[in-house]
Image: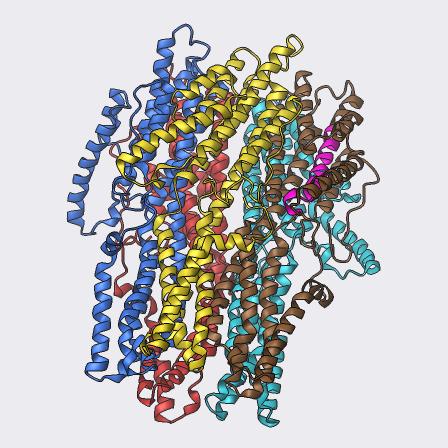
Chain colours: A yellow, B blue, C red, D cyan, E brown
Amino acid sequence: MYTNKTFPLRIILFFCWRELLWFTLLSVAVLAAYKGLGWKFVAIPFLPVATIGTAVAFYVGFKNNSSYERLWEARRIWGAITNVSRSWATLVNTTVGRQQYDDNPDAISRVRRQLLLRQVGWVNALRIQLRRRVLWQEDPTVRSLHVKLVQQQHRQAEEMHSTLEPFLASFELACTDCGATNVPNLLLHAQANQLAELKSRGLLDGFEHASLSALVVECFAQQGAAERIKSFPFPRQYAHFSTIFVSLFTFLLPFALVGEMAKFGEDAVWLALPFSILISWVFFSMESIGDASENPFENGLNDVPMTAICRNIEIDLRELLGDTPLPERIVAVDGVLL
Amino acid sequence: MYTNKTFPLRIILFFCWRELLWFTLLSVAVLAAYKGLGWKFVAIPFLPVATIGTAVAFYVGFKNNSSYERLWEARRIWGAITNVSRSWATLVNTTVGRQQYDDNPDAISRVRRQLLLRQVGWVNALRIQLRRRVLWQEDPTVRSLHVKLVQQQHRQAEEMHSTLEPFLASFELACTDCGATNVPNLLLHAQANQLAELKSRGLLDGFEHASLSALVVECFAQQGAAERIKSFPFPRQYAHFSTIFVSLFTFLLPFALVGEMAKFGEDAVWLALPFSILISWVFFSMESIGDASENPFENGLNDVPMTAICRNIEIDLRELLGDTPLPERIVAVDGVLL
Amino acid sequence: MYTNKTFPLRIILFFCWRELLWFTLLSVAVLAAYKGLGWKFVAIPFLPVATIGTAVAFYVGFKNNSSYERLWEARRIWGAITNVSRSWATLVNTTVGRQQYDDNPDAISRVRRQLLLRQVGWVNALRIQLRRRVLWQEDPTVRSLHVKLVQQQHRQAEEMHSTLEPFLASFELACTDCGATNVPNLLLHAQANQLAELKSRGLLDGFEHASLSALVVECFAQQGAAERIKSFPFPRQYAHFSTIFVSLFTFLLPFALVGEMAKFGEDAVWLALPFSILISWVFFSMESIGDASENPFENGLNDVPMTAICRNIEIDLRELLGDTPLPERIVAVDGVLL
Amino acid sequence: MYTNKTFPLRIILFFCWRELLWFTLLSVAVLAAYKGLGWKFVAIPFLPVATIGTAVAFYVGFKNNSSYERLWEARRIWGAITNVSRSWATLVNTTVGRQQYDDNPDAISRVRRQLLLRQVGWVNALRIQLRRRVLWQEDPTVRSLHVKLVQQQHRQAEEMHSTLEPFLASFELACTDCGATNVPNLLLHAQANQLAELKSRGLLDGFEHASLSALVVECFAQQGAAERIKSFPFPRQYAHFSTIFVSLFTFLLPFALVGEMAKFGEDAVWLALPFSILISWVFFSMESIGDASENPFENGLNDVPMTAICRNIEIDLRELLGDTPLPERIVAVDGVLL
Amino acid sequence: MYTNKTFPLRIILFFCWRELLWFTLLSVAVLAAYKGLGWKFVAIPFLPVATIGTAVAFYVGFKNNSSYERLWEARRIWGAITNVSRSWATLVNTTVGRQQYDDNPDAISRVRRQLLLRQVGWVNALRIQLRRRVLWQEDPTVRSLHVKLVQQQHRQAEEMHSTLEPFLASFELACTDCGATNVPNLLLHAQANQLAELKSRGLLDGFEHASLSALVVECFAQQGAAERIKSFPFPRQYAHFSTIFVSLFTFLLPFALVGEMAKFGEDAVWLALPFSILISWVFFSMESIGDASENPFENGLNDVPMTAICRNIEIDLRELLGDTPLPERIVAVDGVLL
């Protein structure tokens, strides 16, 4: 997530200098043809191009809107993950083994701590899994794909291991190493399993077990929702044609502007240059803002700040457990909060 | 689901070469009449056509938006099916016969496996049923309809049988063969029936039975939602008129462009040809993108990848059961993931 | 629901021949005044009319969108009714009297059948009630209103009786005859009453009774949602002004087109005739598509196919009960599925 | 709710005659300046005004859409209130004291009747409270505000008393008189209190009490939703600027039209008069339709018909109680249903 | 929340005088160059600028819509907080210790009062926390940030203490002082803890405990939703580019208007001045209305009136407890309700 109020020119240019260069070259070429070579026929009327412009503005608006909704839904999901984690911590902390607490406070506290830290483990495992690049984004050459896949799985397993180490019992940690396909799933299963065990040992009654099980089901729902956004990109037929339409429009623009400016006299034709670049840039920017927001889990500038959210959940839960000192909050670096 | 970042020109042309040809022929004809025959009256003013263009852009935008929402809802439903299947697996695995497990681990495990595999059977049966072509999409000649219907039922029954074979007990499989109208329904009923039986045998208590029954109700809800999208197409009055309006607009376009170009001098009139084709193509493409996305369960390029999702659910559930080796994930072929 | 892919010209003309005639007469009159009488002042500039056109296109787009959402919500409600009916059938069939089944299979089966068929009765009663014309759609002359009301109640009572006969016990049927104001309500009350009776006789335990009661509450919710759409039309201030604005626009159009065409020379003025008719038709069609979709329970071409859905529910439930032969599905007649 | 299909001219003029007069005077003045005084400079180009027109159309469209959603949400809330009331009636009627019914049918029936009539009392109390004018709509002069407040509270207390009299026990009625700030709240509290009492007396078991309590919580939710719409108007920054923009546009319009018409020759300038009035009226109407719909609980023409809904709920519940004769339905007066 | 029907000119100017000044200076400069210096080339054609104008209107409309939805969701959350608080009060008041009430009415009443006042404490703590400025809105210079952070935490702790004093037991109050990171969280945990204690002491049964726990979970959900809106601003890429596009458009406007006016003759050029200011102001206002509404918890003019809502909740709950006199409602000061 970009956290500053405004974007410095440096960042804006970083994302569009290639296109600006192209718009400039094209406009210069058109002007050169018109003025230098005297090819008057490169001047075309503006009205038909404006018609495309309006239709394209509609289309780009639709893409922007949809991308924003994807981003906002992603943030909503991580909000719900925060909520369910806090509810989990509170219900676990107040109900698990309440009747038996005075008999054996240490054992009960240990169980509760285990259930809370595993929840922190789950949110972190989910974060790592979501930030992984999906395979359909890679180059589809089969051989290199296989190599990449193995390398990536290796790297990810290491990151998963080191991240989850503080939160899981050693046997669970081992289990997540040996090639499990979906670590967050396994952790939720472990939560449900421990709940059932606590019920059979009488540390939870039927009502409490049902309430806590419902929270596990909610965790599955939010995990699935996040995975859905990750694995179902903004449909390519919509996304790619938006890019094509904008490219077409910006290509035609200098021709049409030369024509329109020529109406004001031959001296005004030079104004087509700055105008063409400016209008092209506005349309290109609108298009690429949508593009940059449609995938909210890709380590980009506009991501959902999952690392910060995971840390906040850890702080909330450790505070309930009475741990000191609490871990530090994640702060934005160069205006970017991950 | 199309999984590549961009569409190659080949695919784009495949979907629109007929229309491109028509746009070209029409423009050539108009130009020939204007220049060759000197019929100046074929040139009409651009402004009224632009007015239609704006109205049509609105309308097409509305259609695109609605189609996208249908597609996205379809994906959301299959996300929910994934979630409910995982929750089902976890709750079944941790609660069914927990008290009695040590007495007879094999029998309990067998029951749990049955409940999990039947869930995999349900998602696959639902997938096959959704991919079946609905009757109102066929030619409505009654006689041939009847023939087709019988043929189709036969083909589908075979596919259903071979797909479900690994997941169901033989008697259930037999039951799905003998002309049941809605196999997924029967499988959910079988799940509920086994839950009730487990409750009456004391392998589930009231709370657990209620939680698991709620998941079966959720399965009915998601199945019904998918069937609703399948059986209620984007209303024809909206869809068909969108096509009519775009056709009308692209028909008038070359006439209006000849008129507009003529203002720039008789030499510029030839430019009406490329322009007419280009603008027509933009509007036609916008329209047909919506068209291609409105039915997300038809084996098309832009479908929800149900086969891949079903396989992922199978992998998740088999992993919980400890099956090895796990089945392979479905990968995209030529950029299309089914 | 209209089920064919396209509308034949015959149907399109059926809905707009009156307006086409009016557009033609108006345009001819304007042209006659301009050319025949030489009243040059009937030619007005196009730009102000285009401004109205844009505003009207926005407005009509809003109406179309809202009408579509009403239609889609109506379909969603009937989807939910299907889901709740299947869940009801499955839960009833697997839990009612399960412990006592072996003692008296016939009696238990009879109770279950009663509960399932009454559900089919409810969906059909709801359908009939929704398809009834509401009073605020009638001419508001009080006297004739009273007469109509009595006639209508009589006709409806007959239809209700004959439709519900196969699904209800005779005493319930009698009860629905004697002027009950809301038959579906009574049937849901009967369901809840039987549930409570089964609980007090020990054929349902507390959990099962709670689950099934929740389904009855859901039925009330869906029935109420359908009645809400029925009794709260698309607000007239929005709907009627949309019609007024379009009428205004199509009235001004021929005047403006004559002016615009006159710029191309006096010979081109005749083109105002086809253009005026065409553009008027596009705007009129957009407007009337929304109009035709805003009330989804009125026996119209674009209705939710409630009769077909009710039959499908009956087939699903009868299949669970083992009835043979199952009733036939409803098929589209002339492309219309009711 | 306005229930006729169309608005008579009389009603339309009633809402806009002041503005029509203003538009006419302004246009006449502009024309007089241009033609009479020969001030040619009052003619301004149309294009910049059209640019404002497009932007304003967007803005007004947004306002219309939001107002419609507020109105529709309000209707949805009252639909939910109907549903929850019916569910309440059915659950109360079938579960309260079922085991004890045969011992003392009269006492049980009395309790049930009390619970149902109090529900009718709640919906009516909520209606009266919502139709009360909120203070921020009054003139903010503090002194008179205080006076008005006291007067209003007095009037409202009287109306509340007479409306609730048939539904409440006398001691409850007394309680609502003595200055309670939120009568509907007190009634829901009374419902919950009686439920708890019935549970402690064994007339409801834990499951039934939980189900009925959930309905009370739902009532609180719907009441709060209605109060939220009432107390949080469509944000003034959006609403007021919409009015300002439209006023600005309609002010500039005659100047621009004179300029545009002048292009057609000096004789056509007079046409600016009807055009200016017409276009101004279209924009003004669009704006004021949103304005008239944004507050759905203000006794206006476009209100949610709460009186009719409350009466329908009363009829439904009294029919369950077997009361005869049932009260009459509310009918529309002059096309307005309250 | 701004509560008056209209904004006085004074307030409107307060928010835009700087921009009005800038628009004026720019227009004067352009006119001076054109007329004074005779630089005819500063006049540029209007059509390309109008194209940007349309695209920008789309974009600003999207921003306005999203901002409004953020504001409305924020209000919805606080509506839900009101509902859950009332439900909590009613359930606590009618169920906690009902069986034991007659034995020890004072003790039971004290417990209920504690649970209700702590709820009031929670809503107020949440309000204070939301109104705190978030760190990413500060100047990102690290050193001063640290200083500000410490100062702010100090100020906030004081405000929190004095606000919560009337609602909490002294030991809880102490606990919130010593640097807890999230006071509302701790209060909800205290609620859940007391519920569990009441259950273990037999003052709540399993059903009642489950119902009340569900309300605590709902509180967590609403708190999290409010924090989500607070901590995830409207994405900067959308918000900032909207400002850039409008600035660009208003910069080009005077150049284009000079050109357009020049068509009407050199005398009309002066009209570019008022027009340029007016149109620029309309676009700037549209943009800044969205800007001013996107953060609904920042003590701004357009905030959700949380202080008033918290007070209303306190009044509702104290009324149930029978406290007199009830606290006064918060009234708007200068048309602003906080």
State the residue in front, D81 or A126: A126
Q: Is residue E133 magenta?
A: yes
Q: Is residue C101 above or below residue A314?
A: above
Task: Tell me where residue E183 sits by quadrant.
Answer: top right
Q: Position of residue C205 (x, y in %)?
A: 49, 20
Task: Tell me where residue D314 sits by quadrant.
Answer: top right
Left or right, A324 with respect to A18, comes to: right
Q: Does the magenta stretch include residue B135?
A: no
Left or right, D186 with respect to A334, comes to: right
- What span is colored magenta in the figure? E115-138
State the residue in front, C256 or A230: A230
Count of numbered tags: 0
Left or right, D133 with respect to A205, comes to: right
Q: Where is residue C47 in the image (x, y as percent from the top left)?
A: 45, 78
Q: Is residue E103 above or below residue D300?
A: above
For this orientation, the residue located farthest to the front is A36
State the residue in front, D202 or D267: D267
For this orientation, the residue located farthest to the top is B103
Q: Is residue C84 above or below residue C250?
A: above
Residue at the image point whose x is 62% and y is 21% from the top: A93
State the residue in front, D36 or D91: D36
Residue at the image point whose x is 57% and y is 47% from the top: D77
Magenta residues, dominant SS class: helix
Left or right, C319 with respect to C142, comes to: left
Residue C133 visible within the image: no
Q: Position of residue C325 (x, y in %)?
A: 24, 34
Q: Where is residue C31 in the image (x, y as percent from the top left)?
A: 35, 86
Residue A324 visible within the image: yes
